């Protein structure tokens, strides 16, 4: 029985570790808000923290147009902080394949909006560059501030 208990403990630890490793977004739910208001608040928070929006994809409209599928409001904002992007490109020229930092907004639970920003540290794990990982940590902090301020 002691062995079984130890095994169960290791399984719980491994499951918790997998959950930690699988976290790849910084999230916040906005309660009882219109989708348009949530988008406006997100854009304002991005600007406040030095990000511009390079791309905007209306996933709901795209799904309807391309495959005649109906989904709830879903928007992807491709956000970029030029100074951070410049530093990242100096450290790793091919990192542009992983840019910009996407921030998504999606309608959830009738009248609520989930805001999720990519966790740059999680996305940069594929690149073996310690200096880039440090930079990604700075960008993560900036995006966490964005999500908090929405």
Image (cartoon, grey):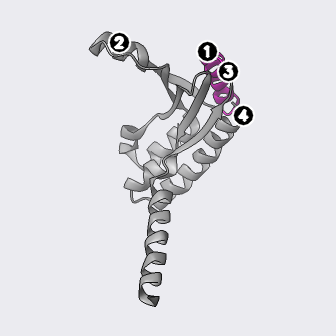
Q: Is residue 116 above or below residue 73?
A: below
> For the C terminus, which image quadrant?
top right
Question: Magenta stretch: dominant SS?
Answer: helix
**The magenta stretch spans residue 72:** no
Judging depth in this view, the residue of 109 and 57 nearest the camera is 109
Where is residue 8 drawn, in percent x and y?
Answer: 45, 76
Q: Which residue is mark 4?
A: 149
Where is residue 123 drawn, in percent x and y?
Answer: 44, 48
Q: CA distance from mark 2 to mark 1?
A: 19 Å
Q: Which residue is mark 2?
A: 64
Judging depth in this view, the residue of 58 and 63 nearest the camera is 63
* Secondary-structure class at tag 2: helix
Q: Is residue 100 above or below residue 91?
A: above
Callout 2 crowding tier (Cα within 10 Å): few <14, some 14–19, many ≥20? few
Mark 4 or 1 closer to N-term?
1
Q: CA distance from mark 1 to mark 3?
A: 8 Å
Q: CA distance from mark 4 to mark 1?
A: 16 Å
**Disc marking residue 33:** 3
What residue range appears in magenta? 33-49
Callout 1 crowding tier (Cα within 10 Å): few <14, some 14–19, many ≥20? few
Q: Which residue is mark 1?
A: 36
* Secondary-structure class at tag 4: helix
Q: CA distance from mark 4 to mark 2?
A: 31 Å
Is residue 83 left or right of 74 when viewed as pictured? right
* Secondary-structure class at tag 3: loop
Camera-side mark, 4 or 2: 2
Mark 4 or 2 closer to N-term?
2
Question: Which residue is drawn at the image coordinates 61% and 49% (left, top)?
Answer: 138
Instruction: Kindly indicate whether the residue at mark 3 contacts the one at mark 2 (C-beta within 8 angstroms).
Output: no
Is residue 94 left or right of 77 when viewed as pictured? left
Mark 2 or 3 closer to N-term?
3
């Amino acid at each position: 029985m002691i062995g079984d208990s130890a095994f169960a403990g290791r399984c719980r630890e491994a499951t918790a570790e997998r959950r930690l490793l699988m976290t790849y977004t910084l999230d916040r739910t906005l309660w009882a808000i219109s989708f348009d208001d949530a988008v406006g608040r997100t854009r304002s928070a991005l600007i406040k923290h030095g990000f511009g929006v390079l791309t905007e994809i209306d996933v709901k409209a795209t799904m309807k147009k391309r495959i005649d599928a109906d989904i709830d409001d879903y928007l992807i904002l491709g956000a970029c902080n030029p100074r951070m992007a410049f530093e990242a490109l100096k450290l790793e020229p091919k990192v542009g394949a992983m840019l910009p930092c996407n921030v998504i907004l999606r309608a959830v639970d009738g009248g609520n909006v989930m805001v999720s920003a990519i966790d740059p540290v999680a996305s940069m794990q594929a690149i073996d560059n310690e200096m880039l990982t440090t930079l990604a940590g700075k960008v993560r902090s900036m995006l966490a501030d964005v999500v908090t301020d929405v």
